[in-house]
Amino acid sequence: MLEFGKSLFTYEQFIPHGHCYLWKPELLGLHIVSDSLIALAYYSIPITLLYFVRKRQDLPFNWVFLLFATFIVTCGTTHLMEIWTLWYPTYWLSGCLKAITAIVSLYTACELIPLVPKALALPSSAQLEAANRELEREISERKQAELALKEREAMLRRISDNLPNGAIYKVIREIDGSDRFSYISAGIEKLMEVRAEDALKDATLIYRQFIPEDVPLLLAAVDESLRNLSVFDIKLQIQTPSARLKCLHFRSTPRQLQDGRMVWDGLVVDVTDLKFAEETLRKNEALLEESQQVARLGNWEFDIVTGKISWSKQLFDLLNRDPALLEPNYQENLQLYWPEDAGKLAQAIERAMSTGESYKLILRASPTYESTIYIEGIGHAEFNADGKVIRLYGTAQDVTERQVAINERKQAEEELQRSETLLATAQKIAHLGSWEWYLESQKQIWSAETFRIFGLNLTESAPTQTAFLQMLHPEDRPVLQRHLLQAIANGNPFNLEYRIIRPDGSLRYLESRAEVAYDTQGKTIRLYGAILDITERKQAEIALKQTEIRYRAIVEDQTELITRYLADGTLTFVNQAFAVYFGRSAEELIGSRYEPIIFEEDRQRVAQLIGSISVDNPVVIVENRVVVANQVRWTQWHNRMLLDEQGCFIEFQSVGRDITTLKQIEEKLFQEKELAQVTLQSIGDAVITTDAFSRIQYLNPIAESLIGCTEASAQRLPLVEVFRIVDEITREPVENPIDLALQSNQIVGLTNNAVLINQNNQEIAIENSAAPIRNREGQIIGAVMVFHDVTQNRKLSHQLSWQATHDALTGLVNRQEFERRVEQALHFAKLDYQVHALCYLDLDNFKIVNDTCGHLAGDELLRQMTALLPEKIRKTDTLARLGGDEFGILLNQCTLEQASKIAHQLLLCIQEFRFVWQEQVFLIGVSIGLVGIDANSESLAEIISTSDAACYTAKRRGRNRVYVAEADD
């Protein structure tokens, strides 16, 4: 080594390189200067590269620059050696330096070749600049979105502070279980007489107002919402600091913060008036039902569009029909009556459907009763905005008693006609009930009609005078007694109206006329006369008086403005509300014209509309401005032409109301609608609204994008035509969530496996919810659905689900999933007496392969086993890797004998298998433990333990065999 080192610097045996240039100074100078400059350049470049790498340590592939620097330094050194060897021929040293340079050059070239594609993949400066511009644009858009979000939040807070009967709140359940309000709008002060600032500091100012009876309900609702993350929705009563009782409706949605706290964002509304109205409505409905039961009256509806007939409970009872049979259809309804009466009813219904004419018929029910039942059927028509009949409704009342009474009266009249004496008497007493009273014997003789009037049985004898007087109304009894005594004493006939109380408790009005009969000595011996039942007339008179009183009270007490006027505009009547509204007395207004009170710009239009009223168009609705106390206000007037019985014009009647507030509300609603439209256009979820028949009314841009059609093209289309959803697994159609919401009248969500097939036949995994839309009366007028794309989330969920139940190396079912399926098989074995079997496999020579060739070979052997074993079992069986070189096979619905055959087939298959790894060949054996699963099997642990023990027994008896577990093992 020392000799080689000396030879590097020995040059006596060589000729200097300058001899090659003949020591010509100009040639030597040329080479010296050229090599010096090249060496200088080669040494300065590495210094520059080292400086660059040091300053830019984040630069990818910076080691390449150092490699280049080494390569260039060696090249520069060879040029210096060229100068040195001009005089000192140390060619061995020069050659070694060139060899080093060659090695460094080749190494640099080899490293540079695979580096070129990576370098080419780096983005160019133009691409980086474009990416920067895109990033700046996204940052700008995000800032604008954040600004818009803050503006909307501020706007919503302003809206919430001005809610007329409600407040918005945000309550937080802390980790320690305490509650506090993080936000509450100013409306809480009007609802609960507590300032928002105080409620934010002390939540108990709110909680202690709940009445004690409702506190358990509140706690239960909060607990359910907290436990299920469900909507908190409850109505509770409170007592404000001023001792006022109110009913408040709380509704909020829970969500969990990252720190574990729960937050409810919601709305509270004062529903005290609504609660009172509901209670009143329930009482009125109960009173109506009781009245219908007493009067044996039922009501019905017939929807012409759907053909559906609806009955009240009383109508089921009246027609002796089981409510469990539901309402009859149109033909079944006609069959409830006698054939001739059914024909009349069908004609009346057809006439009502075509012309809207009401009807009133007496019908006989089909002979399912012991006696004939008479039904008074009344029907009316309901029209839509186009004037077409869309619904019939009415009542059916049992009028058997009245009809029987009418029939009995007809029979009595026929009897009277056959008897001349009775005919003369009947003509004298107006063909009504007659009576006689013999004073000496006190005997009473009553006609059949008289018995009926008093509600007595004809088979009984006439009542005594005492019993008769007891039937009189206590207030009328003294008057009749006085008239009877005067008739007996003075022979004065009388005509008197009085009331009686029937045995059934009903009150009747009677008109009684009496004559006196004398004997030959002029002594009164008998009173006789006629009795007229005037109940209906009296009731009509009373009803007429009450109607007149009510009408006057209604007109005078109405808040609406009521007036009547002639064709020339002269006022003939005004109610009190009209006079008060215009600030003048009724006397001042009557006789004046209505034109001066109308706003000047509206007078011509009002006159034209009033002039259009005619017999064919008797009602005109006019909205115009009027001048009240030097202020201009909006009013609405219903103008009607009043005609007499001959159809001649009498005067006009107008009913008006102030709609100034309504006009202001309409303007505000228009602004809110515009705001809602902008909000729907801006949110990130897809939104669809429909009418009550699932016809599309609105799509926001996200919904258009997901469904693949525009809002204009989808308008009025049935939702199912553009929104097709199927089950991701079964591919069966999924029922539309909007239809479910409309049918169930509640919020519904979609199953987790729903897939939307849009108009471009693209499949999009979605999650959604739908809810019905109700009007103020609670009637469903449509539905809204919100959904969003969860394709990526669902793919990730499926992947995680597969990984949780499968072995990562072989792709087989893992031990946990295998034990679940074995436990399920055990359950069915006990439930349905099914028979199954379990094979426990342990590869015999796996450890030899693993120790000889390493874990990679062992893993490959397991994968090849995974491909080999499924060929020998059925598709219904389960193959699983239980760990290491152990496998499990669940043979579903397989006897122990069949399982033994399958196990031996597996044994033979693995015996014939040869595992080859890097030119080494291995024989692989298997030990199999077999155990049956039936109704006598104890538990999953016993089955697994028994199969493992059987496998161990097979291995202990010489390996490469099948051992079936015995009961006495």
Image: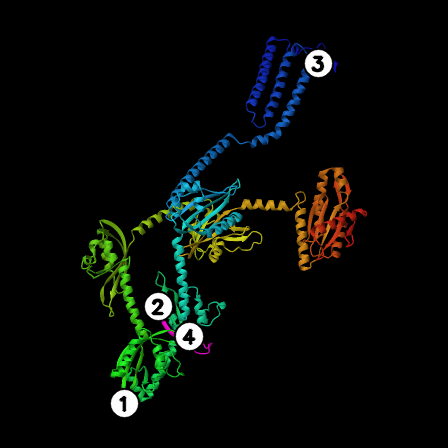
Sequence order check: which comes first, mark 4 or mark 3?
3
Q: CA distance from mark 4 to mark 2?
A: 20 Å
Q: CA distance from mark 4 to mark 3?
A: 135 Å
- Per the rendered image, the range of residues in magenta is 359-373
As drawn, 403 above or below 357: below
Which residue type carries mark 3? Leu
Q: CA distance from mark 1 to mark 3?
A: 185 Å
Sequence order check: which comes first, mark 2 or mark 1?
2
Give the quadrant of residue 467.
Answer: bottom left
Q: Name the residue carrying label 4.
A: 342
Observer able to see residue 369: yes
Q: Name the residue carrying label 2.
A: 355
The image shows residue 164 at horizontal and vertical percentages of 37, 48
Would residue 233 appear left or right of 113 to someone viewing this image? left
Picture disc at residue 8: 3
As drawn, 63 above or below 891: above
Say which residue appears at 29% left-offset and 64% top-offset: 550
Sequence order check: which comes first, mark 3 or mark 2?
3
For label 3, count other residues whose C-alpha is less than 10 Å away and answer few (under 14), some (14-19) or many (20+): some
Q: Are marks 4 and 1 in contact (CB under 8 Å)?
A: no
